[in-house]
Image (spheres, rainbow, N blue to C red):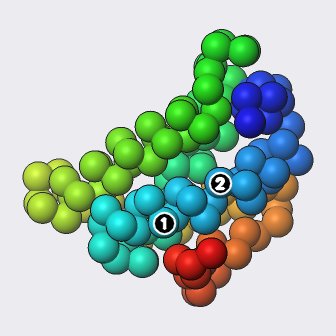
Amino acid sequence: MNDLVERIADRDRAAFGRLYRRLVRAVFIQVCESVGSPSAAVAVTRAVFVEVWQLAPRCAAGQVDGLAWVTAIAVRRTAERLREVDGRTSPLGAEYDELLGRELTAALDGEPPALLGTSVPPTTG
């Protein structure tokens, strides 16, 4: 997993696609259990992977536990969404979720991930 993060830091889209496919279901399940809404979990999961793509170049090579890093991003993004739902922050809305979807598709080299569609990944597995 750490080698994928290092390759993503070098903007390797294929490595990002592999990391995404390897972790998307686990991240979605983790988020969905916390937010309780599959549609909100899709939006948060998108945000997690967009952030992985954006922040990977800032991670010191070999210094990051890839799985722990992605999990920490998911926990933080989930907390942000829960605060938004509680009204403690301003809601970002559907436009932001759509932007994240476009950014994620671009990071996956134009390959639309299943998570971006209308269906939600199954929670069994």
Of residues 89 and 48, the one drawn nearer to the viewer in this rendering: 48
Q: Is residue 64 above or below residue 34?
A: above
Residue where numbered disc 2 is placed: 23
Residue where numbered disc 1 is placed: 29
- Toward which corner of the image does residue 104 lie, by quadrant? bottom right
Of residues 47 and 124, the one drawn nearer to the viewer in this rendering: 124
Instruction: Give, as a three-letter code, the residue at label 1.
Output: Ile
Pointer 2 local density, CA inside 10 Å: few below 14, some 14–19, many at least 20: some
Q: Which mark is residue 120?
A: none
- Residue 23 in sight in this render: yes
Pointer 1 local density, CA inside 10 Å: few below 14, some 14–19, many at least 20: some
Q: Position of residue 31 (x, y in %)?
A: 41, 61
Q: Position of residue 64 (x, y in %)?
A: 62, 21
Q: Is residue 53 above or below residue 91?
A: above
Q: Which of the marked residues, 2 or 1, is nearer the chain's N terminus?
A: 2
Q: Position of residue 116 (x, y in %)?
A: 63, 73
Residue at image point 59% right, 48% down: 50
Instruction: Give, as a three-letter code, the residue at label 2.
Output: Leu
Q: Could you tell me how far apart the alpha carbons at marks 2 and 1 are, in whole angstroms?
A: 10 Å
Residue at image point 51% right, 64% down: 28
Q: Is residue 61 above or below residue 35?
A: above
Q: Secondary structure at mark 2?
A: helix
User: In the picture, which quadrant includes the C terminus?
Assistant: bottom right
Residue at image point 64% right, 32% down: 66
Q: Position of residue 16 (x, y in %)?
A: 77, 45
